[in-house]
């Protein structure tokens, strides 16, 4: 067999015989964007849009410097450094067509875990104009039920005492903003790209709460000078598997240690609220709107919640992937009933959007047989996701007397999932959640106290006081504990 070609700058010319590679001069790019959290999603979405813009020329000031703040970011750092920031994006179409191309917008990568100064200096560099974030729903450090900043977090306490040794995004942002101010440099924009409703507003509020404790004057400066655009981001990006790496090797003879796979669909709707300039993303299909909130809500309450409905019910049933759930008619009917009867009635008015078409398109996207998005990815960090995606819909429906049954079964199933960690065939379920122990401890009391799981106030807020919810939940959770065949319970509700 021919020796494989390692993906890096030196080999790009050779690789371009096999795959589309960047046609712009990457050596001219300056890191105008500092991005924290370089996971698959960032690389399939923002970094891809940025690459498209660079392909059009004239976006040299918007190269991306990746940042990892956690120990676990070492691996992606090492891979991307070795590959000069290059990686392959593999787009899997429903009909089996696969488009692969090498993306060139990431030009550097820095780690903050052991060397916070390196990251602060990068953020405070004159070239930096935007600090963007995909730090996951859990990374924002707010209490899901009150929305308040969580000052009990030990990392936050540490960085409040030691501003030069930041640990969380808030410590890094304040240190960098302060440094820029001292240097007389304009403030950067902080652009959240996470699935949180009003993600810019939330980032602003949390950063201000933190900064107010640390340095009131700085907080006032942030309030005046820093832009926090809200955005809705969308592209289904499953976890990369060895099969993806092998595919590139066997098809193109290219060795990429960490490619990204994704669906063809992509969307980014964002508010034009930048404090220090921005890329002309509208040239590559990004929508700039005055108010993104209705779009965010639609996506979180239909797409993300729909994922969670399939993921949690699917995990207990033993469906490994979202597309496997969509091959099961009962799951499709259940999903649609949830979207139509519970999620849609509590959405805001959306001018010019055909919700039926949107829901149809979600079903098609979920069913893409070549995406193979694992239910374990979808269920991961449910404690941070569900309050926004699903529990909010239950609360809205309780307030207006709407239906809550489909969503409540999912909560009951989540309790069972957290308690037992096995599917219907007794196979272990991989549970990934920062609060896994707390979830397990609460769920495991269900036999003696059927409401134990929903007494977790940080997740469920005051739902424990809602009789309509507690009586339904109690009935459903006991049914699942008596017979874990989830499809029986789904069938009864439809
Ligand atoms: C998923 C999202 O895990 C999840 O919550 O629903 O990662 C989803 O795939 C993306 O938001 C799609 O844009």
Image (cartoon, rainbow, N blue to C red):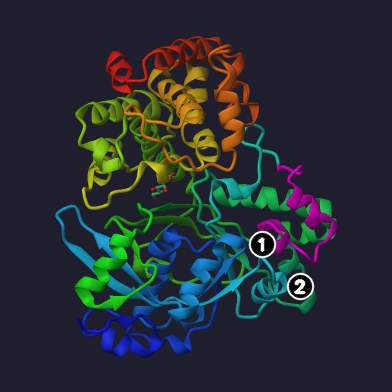
Residue at image point 66% right, 62% down: 226
Q: With respect to residue 317, does 295 lie above or below? A: below
Q: With respect to residue 493, does 128 lie above or below? A: below
Q: Which mark, by number, is residue 179?
A: 2
| Whether the residue under disc 1 has CB within 8 Å of ligand 1 | no
Q: Residue furthest left?
A: 95
Residue at image point 40% right, 33% down: 312
Q: Nearer the viewer, residue 362 or 421?
A: 421
Q: Earlier in the sequence, mark 1 or mark 2?
A: 2
Residue 84: x and y, percent?
45, 81
Q: Is residue 200 visible?
A: yes
Q: Say few, some or many: other residues with alpha carbon within 10 Å of mark 1 (under 14 / 14 to 19 / 20 or more).
A: some
85 sits left or right of 179 in the view:
left
Q: Secondary structure at mark 1?
A: loop
Give the foreground label among 1 and 2.
Answer: 2
Residue at image point 57% right, 68% down: 67
Q: Which residues are magenta?
A: 149-173
Residue 335: x and y, percent?
30, 30
Q: With respect to residue 330, does 324 lie above or below? A: below
| Whether the residue under disc 2 has CB within 8 Å of ligand 1 | no
Give the quadrant of residue 445: top right
Q: Is residue 463 visible?
A: no
Q: Which residue is mark 1?
A: 226
Q: Is residue 154 magenta?
A: yes
CA distance separating discs 1 and 2 = 14 Å
């Amino acid at each position: 067999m021919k020796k494989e070609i390692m993906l890096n700058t030196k080999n790009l010319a050779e690789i371009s015989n096999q795959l589309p590679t960047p046609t712009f001069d990457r050596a001219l790019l300056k890191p105008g964007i500092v991005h924290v959290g370089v996971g698959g999603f960032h690389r399939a979405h923002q970094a891809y849009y940025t690459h498209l813009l660079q392909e059009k020329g004239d976006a040299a000031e918007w190269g991306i410097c990746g940042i990892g703040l956690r120990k676990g970011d070492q691996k992606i750092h090492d891979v991307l450094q070795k590959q000069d920031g290059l990686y392959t994006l593999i787009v899997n179409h429903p009909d089996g067509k696969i488009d692969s191309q090498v993306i060139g917008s990431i030009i550097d990568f820095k780690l903050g875990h052991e060397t916070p100064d390196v990251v602060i200096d990068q953020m405070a560099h004159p070239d930096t104009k935007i600090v963007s974030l995909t730090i996951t729903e859990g990374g924002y450090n707010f209490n899901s039920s009150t929305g308040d900043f969580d000052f009990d977090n030990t990392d936050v306490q540490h960085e409040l005492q030691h501003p030069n040794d930041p640990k969380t995004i808030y410590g890094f942002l304040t240190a960098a903003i302060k440094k820029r101010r001292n240097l007389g440099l304009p403030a950067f924009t902080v652009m959240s790209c996470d699935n949180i409703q009003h993600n810019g507003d939330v980032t602003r509020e949390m950063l201000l709460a933190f900064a107010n404790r640390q340095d009131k004057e700085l907080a006032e400066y942030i309030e005046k000078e820093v832009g926090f655009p809200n955005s809705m981001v969308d592209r289904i990006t499953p976890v990369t598997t060895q099969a993806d790496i092998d595919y590139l090797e066997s098809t193109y003879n290219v060795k990429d240690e960490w490619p990204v796979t994704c669906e063809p669909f992509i969307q980014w709707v964002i508010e034009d609220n930048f404090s220090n300039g921005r890329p002309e993303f509208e040239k590559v299909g990004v929508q700039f709107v005055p108010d993104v909130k209705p779009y965010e809500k639609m996506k979180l309450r239909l797409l993300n919640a729909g994922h969670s409905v399939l993921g949690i019910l699917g995990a207990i049933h033993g469906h490994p992937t979202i597309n496997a759930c969509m091959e099961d008619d009962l799951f499709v009917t259940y999903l649609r009933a949830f979207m139509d009867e519970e999620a849609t009635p509590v959405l805001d008015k959306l001018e010019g959007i055909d919700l039926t078409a949107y829901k149809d398109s979600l079903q098609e996207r979920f069913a893409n047989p070549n995406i193979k998005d694992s239910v374990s990815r979808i269920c991961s960090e449910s404690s941070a996701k569900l309050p926004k995606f699903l529990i909010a819909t239950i609360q809205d429906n309780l307030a207006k007397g709407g239906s809550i049954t489909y969503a409540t079964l999912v909560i009951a199933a989540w309790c069972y999932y957290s308690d037992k960690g096995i599917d219907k065939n007794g196979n272990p379920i991989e549970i990934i959640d920062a609060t896994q122990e707390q979830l397990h401890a609460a769920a495991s009391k269900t036999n003696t106290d059927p409401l134990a799981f929903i007494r977790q106030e940080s997740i469920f807020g005051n739902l424990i006081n809602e009789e309509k919810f507690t009586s339904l939940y109690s009935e459903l959770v006991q049914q699942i504990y008596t017979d874990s065949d989830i499809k029986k319970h789904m069938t009864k509700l439809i």
